[in-house]
Amino acid sequence: MIQSRQNALVKHLRALADKKERKRSGTYLIEGEKTVKESFLLGAEVVSVLGLPDLVAQYEGKCARVEYAEKDIVDYCADTLTPQGIVAEVKIPVTPDVMRGSAVILDGVSDPGNAGTIIRTCAAVGVENIIAVNSVDLFSPKCVRASMSGIFSVNVFDVDPKRALELSEGRTIFTADMSGESVFSVKADEFCLVVGSEAHGVSGFFRAAADKTISLPMKPKMESLNAGVSCSVILYQLMKSRI
């Protein structure tokens, strides 16, 4: 039973809130009974589990390390205000050399809630690839929580704009913008949907590279929806025949 915050594993799990530690270790933190259970069910590579005995005993023999800890120690490792008594360390998957299928390109998306929502929707509709360009770290605790286990079902490519276009080769590139053609009149097989930053929209680089700009029709004087909501609606329309 771990009782000290000075324990090496505890210090490491706590540090995973920081991007530098995630990059150094190649792992990220998840928390909550449901999310930890789904990480095993969906094939994530779980490195370690730490938590209250009645919550973590079931994972004995299922990953490299299972540790029991007192509640205040688990709470210390967790990132949420109301921890649920269990956290786990998961390996960041190796990025594939080749991308198969459709993708969403996050072009400067900085809000972890929006990014997590997009990941969750991608997992739901069967878009298996997220390409992050100058965007929030998709393995940050807030983004992982917002993805609601969707992070276990997508390939994450954190690349520069040029590499993003290389990965997108052979696919129709859509940019999402209020000035574009209605998404309800558009069809595509494999595609890459570019979603821009909340403040500035899609960058000039991807506007120039796009095959078509698409939008969600709205009532006059209505401002645009946030990135997570608009991307979700567009994805369901583009993928409706394949769900």
Image (cartoon, grey):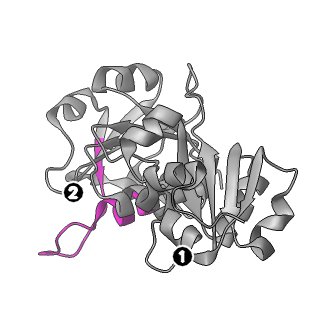
Instruction: Report if residue 78 is visible in the image.
Output: no
The numbered mark at residue 102 is none
The reply, left or right, for residue 118 in relation to residue 213 is right
The reply, left or right, for residue 238 in relation to residue 231 is right
Bin the neighbour count of mark 2 within 10 Å (Cα to Cα): few under 14, some 14-19, many 20 and up.
some
Identify whether 186 is placed above or below 218. Answer: above
The reply, left or right, for residue 61 in relation to residue 183 is right
The numbered mark at residue 83 is 1
Tell me, yes or no, whether the highlighted magenta stretch contains residue 132: no
Residue 114, picture quadrant:
bottom left
Type of amino acid under label 1: Pro
Residue drawn at the location 70% of the way across and 42% of the way down: 45
| SS assignment at label 2 | loop
Residue carrying label 2: 198
Residue 81, picture quadrant:
bottom left
How far across and how far down the image is residue 165, in percent? 36, 24
Identify whether 237 is placed above or below 81. Answer: above
Instruction: Report if residue 23 is visible in the image.
Output: yes
How far across and how far down the image is residue 66, in percent? 76, 55
Residue drawn at the location 50% of the way across and 52% of the way down: 11
| SS assignment at label 1 | loop
Residue drawn at the location 31% of the way across and 32% of the way down: 211
Tell me, yes or no, whether the highlighted magenta stretch contains residue 232: yes
**Which comes sooner in the sequence, label 2 or label 1?**
1
Q: How far apart are marks 2 and 1 (CA)?
A: 29 Å
Type of amino acid under label 2: Glu
How far across and how far down the image is residue 93, in percent? 60, 35
Could you tell me which quadrant the C terminus lies in?
bottom right
What segment carries the magenta color? 213-234
